[in-house]
Structures are given as C-alpha cells and as structure tokens.
Image (tube, helix red, strand yellow):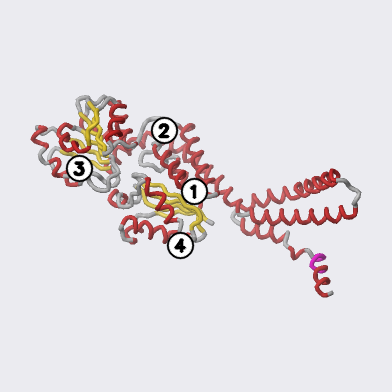
C-alpha cells in the first residue's frame, strides 16, 4: 500500500483549466463515490478550492489509480486526457506526505499562511469520513497534518497578519485608486471569500459596501454585519453605474457580468473608472469586459503580483515552518514503515499465545489440584514472561522496518519463528500420519 497525492493547482494549471474541473461542495461526495469505485484505491479524499482540485489516497497499484482518477477528471471537466496530463501532478510516498502536510499548513497556498485552507482541508476530510472513503492510514495522516499545521501557526507566527486572496484583491484596489474612502463597493456573492473581502474593505474605510446575492437573505446578513446595504439580484445590473469597485465571488458556472452590461455605463459615470476583481472559479466576468475604456478587470491569477509581495514578508517564518514540517514528515514516514512489520509481529504474538496455551494445558493436566485463582496466577506469570521476552525483538523489528532494508529484516523476523524450525513437532506429526 502506498500513499499518493494528485490533481492540479494554481502552480500547475491556469484558471481556464482549473475552472473546468471546479467541483462544488455538494458534488464532492458523488465524485468521491466514483473515485472509490476502483479496486486499487483503498482510501481517498478530495480537496476542491478556487486554487486547487487535489486527490489524496492509498493504493496498491499507483499506475491504475492514476489512470482511473485521470478518467474521472476528464469526464467531469470535458477536457481531453492529454490536456489534463500536462497540468496534473502525481506524488507518492514521502513526496505525497510532504505535499499534504504543506497544503494543510498553508505553505503551498498562493498566499503563504492564509487561514482559509485549514477550514477547507478539515471540511474535505469530514466529507470523506462521512462517505467512508477514508480509513486508518488517511485518518492518521490528516490528523497529523492538522496537528502540524496548528503547531506551525502558533510557533512561527506565519499567520499573524490577515493575508488571503481577498486581502490581495483589496491591496490591488488601493494600488489603483489610492484612497478608498470615497469609493462604493459592490460584492457579488455572499460566501466566505466575499465576507473576507468585506472585512478587509471595511478596515480601509470605504464609503459604502453593497452586497448582492441570489439568496437575498444572505446578502442582507452580510451587508448588516459591515453596515452596508443589500441589493436584490434582479436589480444588480441597474445598480452597476453606482459601483466603483466590484468584487465577484460566486459559484456560478458561467459569466454573470458581460460586456453588454458595461457598454452604456461610461456616460453615466463621466469617465470615472470601475475596478472589477473576479475571484470566482469558474470566472464570473467575461474577459471582453476589459475591452471597454475605463473598466479594469482582474481575475484570480492577476492577483499573483500582489501575493508575491506578501510572500516576501513571510519568508523567514516559512523557512522555520519547513524545517518543522520535514521533521514531522520523517516521523510519519517512520510510523508508516513500521506498520509493515505489524503482520509479522502479529504472527509471532499468535505463535507465542499458542505455545503458552499448549504448555498451560499440559501443566494443568499434571496438577489437577490447583484451584482457579492459582491457575490464573500461573497463566498471568507465563504471559508476562513471554511479553518481556518478545518486547526487545518487537522493538528491534519496528525500528529496522523503517530502514532502507526494512523488508529484508521483516522477512528474517518471520523466518525466525517459522514453523519449519519445529523439528520435534514436525517429526511427531509425521509419525502419527504413518501410524
């Protein structure tokens, strides 16, 4: 059994590829069910965010597991497998463990240290657990990854400043407009990303925040939290001339804002610019909006220049975090390798139990006068002796199992307690068969 990590993210695929493979929260369980249909995949978990769609799993045949996942991804996205292959990464063993740890600790995020990924990572694990597609190995791995993530955040200070894609969007708005105090902001969408953007914008002292969402109640709730106003979704296009900054973050599968919605706005605004940031995946603003004068459209990938500046401030903390992470990866890898010795240790323990049982039956038949309490004491003493004798070889084989020649040591350990060394017993059985 081997651990693997595969998929695509902002490092391996542009937004136009990622948006085709975007998987909504309510779709994750059905995709997990499909992925787990393959006989070579024993455990599997799916993480889908605006920056990544990744699968973590355990398989006895990595080649077949990869082919199956590629096939499922191709059907979901309607992308040719050859195109997907150009953007999909595949890690196994230590490399996969390290990647999973880095994702959970936000060391692999576009903005290092952003806290949002931790919640998304937890949610993905919860869904997989509810779907019963994770068992002992991935449960242990995810628990360890989240524990490492918490340690890194508390000990390195990597998340002290509020940095996220939403924060980067606000930073870009400040760079273009300078003072935001006289600017009206329209948030299209009322989810977590929109809430983060609203929080950052409110801190800059914008003139007013308007929120529009298909579910009006959600728009009202978010607007009230920041002293803003809710806009009915069917009134959205009428309100566009009032907005200086538009931040779009919805789950729509196609553009909500298109070129025709902005073509007549310039006259009403007397040439005042409109700044649009589309942080949705798939993109919710058509690309040709950028062709209109005084309208500036940026998507999630355009934020990378802002993000890069934030990354510089976290380099020292990230370096310390990477050292801690390497140590934890080594510990988990050691635990994983030691598991290989478990079947051999179990066999030896079973053999020891059989010997104890046989010898006790023989002893008690020769000493019928012993009462129940005396028998229990003798049995406990004998088991204690056996446990003490086996303790050292058990610890030895666990340690050696994590070395480069671990498989050889395990084989030797099993061989030592093989039945073929029971010459007397084999001889007695042979005599019985002859008679």
Instruction: Choose the circle earlier in sequence order: 3 or 2.
Output: 2
Q: Badge 1: how crowded within 10 Å, few (<14), some, or many (20+)?
A: many
Q: Which residues are magenta?
A: 423-427
Instruction: Choose the circle earlier in sequence order: 1 or 4.
Output: 4
CA–CA distance in space, label 2 to label 1: 22 Å
**On the rendered structure, is 265 left or right of 390?**
left
Instruction: Choose the circle earlier in sequence order: 3 or 1.
Output: 1
Query: CB under 8 Å between callouts 1 and 4?
Result: no
The answer to whether residue 402 of the structure is visible from this angle is no
CA–CA distance in space, label 1 to label 4: 20 Å
Residue 83 falls in which quadrant of the image? bottom left
x and y, in percent, of residue 291 in the image: 14, 44
Q: Which residue is label 2 attached to? A: 159
CA–CA distance in space, label 2 to label 4: 39 Å
CA–CA distance in space, label 3 to label 1: 41 Å
Q: Nearer the viewer, residue 170 or 330?
A: 170
Q: Which residue is label 1 attached to? A: 97
Q: Which residue is label 4 attached to? A: 64
Query: CB under 8 Å between callouts 3 and 2?
Result: no
């Amino acid at each position: 059994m081997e651990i693997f990590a595969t998929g695509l993210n902002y490092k391996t695929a542009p937004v136009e590829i990622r948006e085709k493979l975007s998987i909504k929260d309510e779709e994750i369980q059905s995709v997990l069910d499909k992925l787990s249909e393959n006989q070579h995949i024993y455990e599997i978990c799916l993480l889908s965010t605006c920056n990544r769609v990744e699968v973590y799993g355990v398989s006895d045949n990595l080649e077949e597991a990869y082919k199956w996942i590629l096939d499922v991804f191709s059907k979901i996205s309607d992308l040719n497998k050859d195109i997907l292959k150009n953007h999909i990464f595949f890690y196994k063993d230590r490399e996969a463990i390290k990647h999973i740890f880095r994702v959970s600790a936000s060391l692999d995020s576009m903005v290092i240290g952003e806290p949002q990924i931790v919640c998304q990572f937890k949610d993905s694990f919860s869904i997989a657990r509810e779907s019963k597609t994770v068992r002992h190995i991935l449960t242990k791995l995810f628990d360890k990854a989240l524990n490492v993530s918490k340690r890194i955040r508390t000990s390195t200070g990597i998340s002290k400043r509020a940095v996220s894609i939403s924060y980067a969007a606000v930073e870009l708005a400040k760079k273009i407009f300078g003072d935001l105090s006289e600017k009206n902001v329209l948030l299209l969408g009322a989810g977590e990303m929109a809430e983060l953007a609203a929080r950052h914008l409110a801190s800059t002292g914008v003139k007013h925040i308007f929120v529009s969402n298909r579910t009006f109640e959600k728009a009202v709730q978010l607007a009230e939290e920041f002293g803003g106003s809710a806009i009915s979704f069917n009134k959205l296009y009428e309100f566009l001339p009032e907005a200086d900054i538009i931040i779009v973050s919805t789950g729509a599968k196609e553009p909500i804002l298109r070129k025709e919605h902005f073509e007549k706005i310039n006259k009403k605004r007397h040439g005042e610019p409109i700044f649009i940031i589309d942080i949705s995946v798939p993109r919710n603003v058509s690309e040709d909006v950028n062709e209109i004068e005084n309208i500036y459209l940026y998507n999630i990938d355009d934020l990378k220049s802002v993000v890069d500046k934030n990354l510089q401030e976290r380099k020292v903390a990230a370096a310390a975090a990477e050292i801690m992470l390497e140590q934890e990866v080594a510990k988990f890898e050691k635990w994983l390798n030691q598991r290989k010795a478990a079947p051999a240790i179990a066999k030896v323990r079973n053999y020891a139990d059989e010997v104890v049982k046989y010898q006790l039956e023989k002893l008690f038949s020769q000493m019928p006068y012993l009462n129940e309490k005396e028998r229990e004491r003798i049995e406990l003493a004998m088991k204690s002796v056996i446990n003490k004798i086996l303790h050292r070889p058990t610890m030895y084989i666990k340690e050696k199992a994590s070395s480069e020649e671990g498989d050889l040591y395990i084989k030797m350990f099993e061989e030592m307690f093989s039945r073929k060394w029971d010459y007397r017993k084999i001889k007695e059985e042979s005599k019985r068969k002859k008679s």
